Image (spheres, helix red, strand yellow):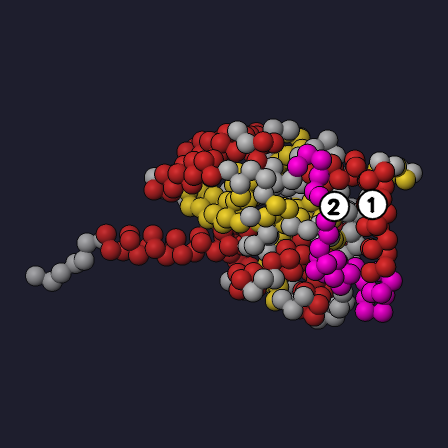
Amino acid sequence: MNVGPDDRFYQSVPLFARFEGVVDRQNYKPLPDDWCLAIADIVGSTHAILEGRYKAVNMAGASVISAVLNALGEHELPFIFGGDGAMVAIPAGGVDTAARALASLRNWVASDLQLDMRVALVPVSDIRAQGLDVRVARFAASSNIAYAMFTGGGASWAEQEMKAGRYRVDVSDAEPRPDLTGLSCRWDPIQAHNGEIVSIIAKPTSAETMDAFRKLVGDIIAVTAEQNREAHPIPASGPDLAFSAEGIRNEISATAPSSGRIRQRLSIILQIVLTVVLHKLNLPLGSFDARRYKADVAANSDFRKFDDGLMMTVDVDAGHRDRLVQRLEAAERDGVCEFGLHRQDKALLTCFVATALSRDHMHFIDGASGGYALAASQLPEKRAQARKAEALAQPTGQNI
């Protein structure tokens, strides 16, 4: 990637350590005007999830981050995972490389996962021409990793533009496979321990409601904070040592060509066996500590985020779930927000691990039977119902 003066922008954004900081406007800095948003999602993800293909959908969503960061050779860029898609903010010098990576990714998703992926590159300058913005904050999920938070309305606008067919990436000679090194989905879905796994998406209805929306976000965080580990779906010691055959198959497909898949399968199985043995015996192997790695998986997970609105996948009991629903429903009735919520009994973990010897590995959490994608699918229906109700409330003119 050609390095420009703004390429280290993200590293200049100050860290905040308490998640409540997502509503503090002072934590956010505007993206440079010559950057772009690389965005992708799965067409028909709801249908694929209902067919039981949620692991493939999540793998495809996380692969956007892996493909773009690996292509640029830069893992410290702002990104966000949304379940059936993702977004990465790209410096001007990396736009051409990112376009080729996205086109290759679309090819791989179609050929290996049998899913249809939309990909787009949206200039930040075009977003600002609409009177919107893209501002970024850095939330320190742990001492090892920070995740980007986005506000300003621009990311949501860019997503809608992509879905409308604009800003499409067209690279005719893209490679058939992107570089997805480090992408994995080995862990079995994680059973809820408080009650159930709830995936929530809440968006403000307008700029005029933002103060009330920030109060809503604070209230939601406060309710979840009453649960063990702030309703984190993964125990502090990390996920159980149980591994998913389907996830391993997806990882092999992502990280090895057809000719190398037997060798890759053997390598992954060896890594798993070695991890289990080292964990049970509590033995380090050089700088790798299996128990510390497993605990870091939990600490580094992105179960809460902000992307022009609140996104959470949390483990709550029935009482706390009901309080969350009641607060969200009240805010929706008051015109403060629109929200989608999906309930399931397990959480799903998809990982991006550049090297297990470094502690900055990334772990993306979603609900294991639809999560964010099914929560998001509720929003268009609610909008249609609201428009219908508004139209019915309008007086009908009559000729006298």
Marks 2 and 1 in Cβ contact (< 8 Å): yes
Query: Tag on residue 339?
Result: none
Please determine whether, in this image, residue 237 is positioned above or below residue 114: above
Question: Is 56 situated left or right of 262 in this image?
Answer: left
Report the magenta residues as a range: 235-264
Question: Is 381 situated left or right of 251 in this image?
Answer: left
Amino acid type for the residue under numbered disc 2: Leu
Q: Quadrant of residue 8?
A: top right
Amino acid type for the residue under numbered disc 1: Thr
- Residue annotated with mark 1: 275
Residue found farthest to the left: 400
Nearest to the observer: residue 271 or residue 380: 271
Residue found farthest to the front: 280
Measure how far apart labels 2 and 1 are at the Cα level. 9 Å
| Residue 123 visible in image | no
Query: Tag on residue 241?
Result: 2
Please determine whether, in this image, residue 53 is positioned above or below residue 272: below
Q: Position of residue 279 (x, y in %)?
A: 82, 40
In what element is the residue under mark 1?
helix
Q: Position of residue 55 (x, y in %)?
A: 64, 57
In what element is the residue under mark 2?
loop
**What residue is shown at x 68% (from left), y 51% (from top)?**
188
**What residue is shown at x 84% (from left), y 50% (from top)?**
273
Question: Is 204 situated left or right of 45 in this image?
Answer: left
Q: Is residue 67 magenta?
A: no
